[in-house]
Image (cartoon, grey):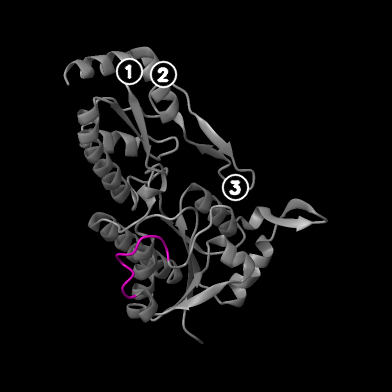
Amino acid sequence: MGKKRIGILTGGGDCPGLNAVIRGVTKTAINKYGMEVIGFHDGFEGLIENRFTFLTFEKVSGILTQGGTILGASNKANPFEHIVLENGKTVTIDVSDQCMELYQDLGLDALIAVGGDGTMTIAGMLAEKGARIVGVPKTIDKDLMETDTTFGFDTARQVATEAIDRLHSTAQSHHRVMIVEVMGRNAGWLALESGVAGGGDIILIPELPYQMKEVYRVVRQRSRFGKGGEQVVKKIVEDSPERVRLGGISHRISHQIEEATGIESRVTILGHLQRGGTPTPLDRLLATRFAVKAMELVVSQERK
């Protein structure tokens, strides 16, 4: 009988610490358990399109500090709703059986899926078809159920806090209101913690309704010293599991503040800056611990 073999993929958007997980899984599998590791490219796309590579000790050496993921990621690929072009029209088909065939042909003993809500939902559906799945939670939003924290959050929080720190000086120099918009979707952890750490005067989060008249009051009060908000949808992406793209609320608030108070306002949208770059030590440690635990779960289940 040949070596035991596991697969790993990184689904959803990129996130600081993904490479730390890939490294941790690969080195633990090879060094501790004598297993082979197959990495699927671009999340579930690799499983659908038969695109993968064997991960070796050498391939994952030196990637701990790198942002992004050496395997690539995709937030649109879904084996149960694979998008194809038929007769000039876009349709969705179920190719999950095809993915299961590849899973079996490769002789995988388990598949480690690294991702957020969408990735875990798809992974769960594959598990129902017979795949042995271990999920590793990943998101900068820190919004996954049954998960206290996720790697990537600390790095994003640091980037946002540093941005706020830098904006303080120009705000004071020009007597302006500076609005910083961060990611987080329906969770306000990133906005709350970076806002508090950065000394923000007003912090608006999705979980709590806000009243603009209270915002105006604080702005006027702060300027003298030298509840019913709604989400703003930026666009709809039809071929994505997360169709709704939020964004642009900062521009609306900026316009309202200028009209109501007469105080000049400027907007900074951090966007994908929060998801890139070198992960913090905390995120590297957490991602590595998740990776080692994932392998322990693979092996302990295998022994039952």
Q: Is residue 82 visible?
A: yes
Are the residues at dot 2 and dot 1 in contact (C-beta closer than 8 Å)? yes
Asked whether residue 133 is drawn in magenta, I would say: no
Helix, strand or loop at disc 1?
A: helix
Q: Residues within 10 Å of mark 2 (few under 14, many from 20)?
A: some
Are the residues at dot 2 and dot 3 in contact (C-beta closer than 8 Å)? no
Q: Residue at x 35, y 30 (%)?
A: 266
Q: Residues within 10 Å of mark 1 (few under 14, many from 20)?
A: some
In the depicted view, which residue is nearer to us: 125 or 285?
285
- Give the side of residue 208 with respect to residue 81, left or right: left
User: Which residue, given by chain and number where applicable, does mark 1 sit on?
Assistant: 215
User: Residue 246: x and y, percent?
Assistant: 49, 36
Q: Residue at x 52, y 64 (%)?
A: 132
User: Which residue, given by chain and number where applicable, does mark 3 sit on?
Assistant: 240
The amino acid pointed to by label 3 is Ser
Asked whether residue 63 is drawn in magenta, I would say: yes
- Give the side of residue 298 with respect to residue 221, left or right: right
User: Residue 169: x and y, percent?
Assistant: 20, 35
* Magenta-tinted stretch: 61-69
Labels 1, 3: front one: 1
